[in-house]
Amino acid sequence: MARVRRPDTPAEAAGDPSAGGAGTRVPLSPLKTTVIVLALVLVGLELGLRALGFSYYWALSRFPDPHRGFAPMAGAAARQAQEGEAWVSINDHGFRDGDWTVQGDTHRIAILGDSMTEAVQVPVEVTWWRRLEGRLDACGYRDRPVELMNFAVSGYSTAQALETLRHHLPPHRPDEVWLAFFPGNDVAENHPQLNGDPMRPYLRPAADGWAMDYGFRDHPRYRRKAGALGQGYYAYLLRLRLAQAVVLVHHGLSLAAHLKGMERDWYWEPGIDARVYAPPGDEPWTEAWAATRELLRRTHAEARALGAAFRVVALTTASQVAPDAGRGQAMAARLGVPDLFYPNWLVGHFAAEDGYTYTDLAPALADHARATGQQLHGFGATRGAGHWNATGHAAAARELAHRLCPSAEDP
């Protein structure tokens, strides 16, 4: 015979729902209600951001790296719309490019550099290296199919480019290694005082010459990012648009605070200290140039150790190639120099003395901009400042193709 449960209390016996018992409904506590509502709101926001097509590339671009300090997340894909606009995909090797071949008959050119070459401001098919690949292929460069492999990362210094060569290029067996030198900030980024970023390696003077300083590995911020919690955080960033939106807000607030407290006397262009256009006037700049030269020497030596030819390609700043020549002249007058090509000239001087190939795009692109009236840098309201736009990338590819393969024809 089934056992019948007796009521525990008079209220339960009378059928009071608040008394509990079998078959009764217990109201949710305020805490549980809050958690459920919050979860629904977060899910709704995530779905809404996805429906709007929102994603934020810069949230995925600073994954901790033990050699370079930071790097994009391999396999990441997101939109970049803070300057220009493009969908940015990172390949399985951790760079903005497609899959690379391993065919023995391909002439491979590995390109090192920073944001001017990663070029997340424009679609990948518009970048100067992708345009140049087709031109060199068409003109029979080196009498083999040509593949340009992009190893550039936004924000990289020459030291980080060297670390990229050491740890990422050997498996791909490049026939040539190019370092795309950006005269605007590459020199300053090679000195901790001028750059102020503790999350990257620096080449420093040492008792026996020079030594790479990887002190960022001991920085609390790096240790947090590289730890288990940090890895979990980046896994969420990769998958959740809402987490990327939070990073976007944080970056915006940080940038506003940085601009408010920044000494702007020499910052006439975004991210560029104009003193780079003149011979070094103090010890930090002298040290920065010395470190830059040594880094170029080491990059040259390591490329040759891979059996690859080495070339430095000097890019341009917006002021160097402004259609209005008066803009650059005003800067040059304040600096007491004849023009703004000093950093390009000095790297060319290093190349001549240290024995590697050098190609300077700045004079030719300045002539092109002034002859056509075209702005090669900037987008929309910021046209004339910042990174190369599609016109700048096309002009650079055309000029490089003509230098490397005189038979190359304009499409």
Image (spheres, grey):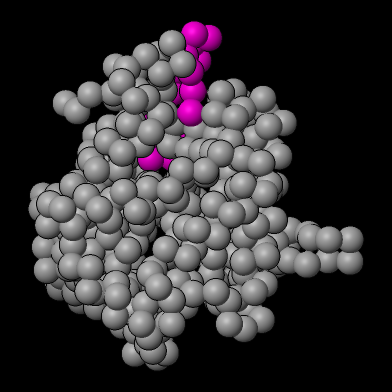
**Residue 397 visible in the displayed image:** yes
Q: Any magenta on residue 13? A: no
In what quadrant of the picture does the C terminus appear?
Answer: top left
Q: Quadrant of residue 209?
A: bottom right
Q: Is residue 32 left or right of residue 209?
A: left
Pick the front one: 83 or 369: 369
Q: Residue at x 54, y 65 (%)?
A: 187
Residue at the extreme front of the image, as rendered: 338
Q: Is residue 196 above or below residue 225?
A: below
Q: Residue at x 40, y 29 (%)?
A: 404
Q: Position of residue 294 (x, y in %)?
A: 69, 56
Q: Is residue 162 above or below residue 124?
A: below
Q: Is residue 227 above or below residue 261?
A: above
Pick the front one: 286 or 299: 286
Pick the front one: 17 or 377: 377
Q: Residue at x 39, y 68 (%)?
A: 340
Q: Position of residue 372 (x, y in %)?
A: 12, 52
**Residue 229 visible in the displayed image:** no
Q: Is residue 229 left or right of residue 365?
A: right
Q: Position of residue 363 (x, y in %)?
A: 34, 53
Q: Quadrant of residue 328?
A: bottom left
Residue at the extreme right of the image, as rendered: 208
Q: Residue at x 15, y 73 (%)?
A: 16
Q: Any magenta on residue 104? A: yes
Secondary structure mostly taken by the magenta-highlighted segment of the chain: loop
Q: Position of residue 29 (x, y in %)?
A: 26, 75
In what quadrant of the picture does the N terminus appear?
Answer: top left
* Magenta segment boundaries in residue numbering: 90-109
